[in-house]
Amino acid sequence: MGRKARVGITRDLFDQNGNPTGPGPGPKFLEEIPGVEYDMLPSLSPEVTPEQVRGFDIAVGFVPKWTARSLAGNNQLIALLRGGVGYDYVDVPALNDADVLLCTVPPAVRRPMAVAILTFILTLSTHLRIKDKLTRQGRWAERDQYHGVGLTGKTLGSIGVGNIGHEMFKLAQPFGIKPIACDPYSKPEDVADVGVELVDMNTVLAESDFLNISCPLNEQTRGLIGKKELHQMKKTAFLINTARGPIVDEAALIKALQDGVIQGAGLDVFQQEPTPPDNPLLTLENVIVTPHALCLTDEFFTTMWQEISRQVSQIICGEIPQKLINREVWDKPQFQSRLQKFREALR
């Protein structure tokens, strides 16, 4: 009988006592796959090192970055399975050069992130944060200064209407909000079921009462929303960003919020994370902030590990894993040769 497939998991997915973070069975889903064993990477650092990943066939990562250095001298690693949907923490060309697959888990983030966006919409539209403060401080007389914003007939716009954006519009339908979006990768038939009108970015900026950002961070989207774009928005509009902080020019956003260029913002992500305690965003009354954590629900963790376990099983069986990002690696003869040797070693 051959050896077992070894899965290495970055230590950020475990607490100090070695217990999985998050509710649910966690990596125990991997125990249901015959011939698989898993372990934590031996240490935690901002960037995965060659020493940490040595000896593993498949890696599961969440927070740490993966660079060309992470893969230096490694001829064993077959795949990196990222426990999220964004992969800006991963040097994809480096993985391609090293013949390593990259997979993500969109089903895990789809519903939790859509709910998070709606949470921001509802909280901002009702001025919930401010009203909570007024109540706690006994300032009831000031409540008439903060009338809420009804959602019926308002326009919800989204920059990006893929996995998360589509689910957000689905959940928003009962509120009677007009849905519009811009997304160069979406076609009208892709969003017809949720009634989204695809328009250009200028239209989304100008017409949205709530502007959601659900696009990936890359060289095309870095700094996508700056001073010019913020000034195209309605003064009564709210900006919601749960994607990646650098998509928005943070200095321009702070100025816009201070000057009343837009009404408010809900932010789960920042230009620098953790954001410095002296960040002006943390002092503004018209901003709701969370520590890049709204997705982290029991639903997320359970679905994440289910999807990762399915991908591990598919790779072991020689099948193309779901949500494979770099298909070009799978098609390389040298990768197929490595995959065959790996599978033969398990028999």
Image: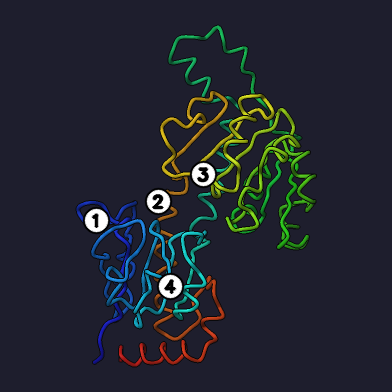
**Residue 142 rendering spot, x and y as whole percentages:** 56, 10
Count neighbours of disc 4 (C-alpha within 10 A) and say few if under 14, some if 14 to 19, many if 20 or more: some
Which tag, 1 or 2, sits closer to the chain's start?
Answer: 1
Q: Quadrant of residue 207?
A: top right
**Residue 186 rendering spot, x and y as whole percentages:** 72, 61
**Residue 62 rendering spot, x and y as whole percentages:** 40, 59
Count neighbours of disc 3 (C-alpha within 10 A) and say few if under 14, some if 14 to 19, many if 20 or more: some
Judged by depth in the image, the label closer to the viewer, 1 or 3, is 3
Judged by depth in the image, the label closer to the viewer, 1 or 4, is 1
Q: Which residue is mark 4?
A: 310
Q: Are marks 2 and 4 in contact (CB under 8 Å)?
A: no
Residue type beneath disc 3: Gln
Q: Quadrant of residue 208?
A: top right
Which tag, 3 or 2, sits closer to the chain's start?
Answer: 3
Q: Which residue is mark 3?
A: 271
Q: Which residue is mark 2?
A: 298
Secondary structure under tag 2 reads: helix
Is residue 155 shown above or below 198?
A: above
Judged by depth in the image, the label closer to the viewer, 3 or 4, is 3
Q: Are marks 3 and 4 in contact (CB under 8 Å)?
A: no
**Residue 168 rendering spot, x and y as whole percentages:** 62, 48
Toward the top, the furthest residue is: 141
Secondary structure under tag 3 reads: loop
Which tag, 1 or 3, sits closer to the chain's start?
Answer: 1
Q: Disc number at residue 221?
A: none
Question: How far apart, in angstroms, are the residues tagged by discs 1 and 3?
Answer: 30 Å
Q: Are marks 1 and 3 in contact (CB under 8 Å)?
A: no
Q: Disc number at residue 19?
A: 1
Residue in view at x 62 percent, y 28 percent? 257
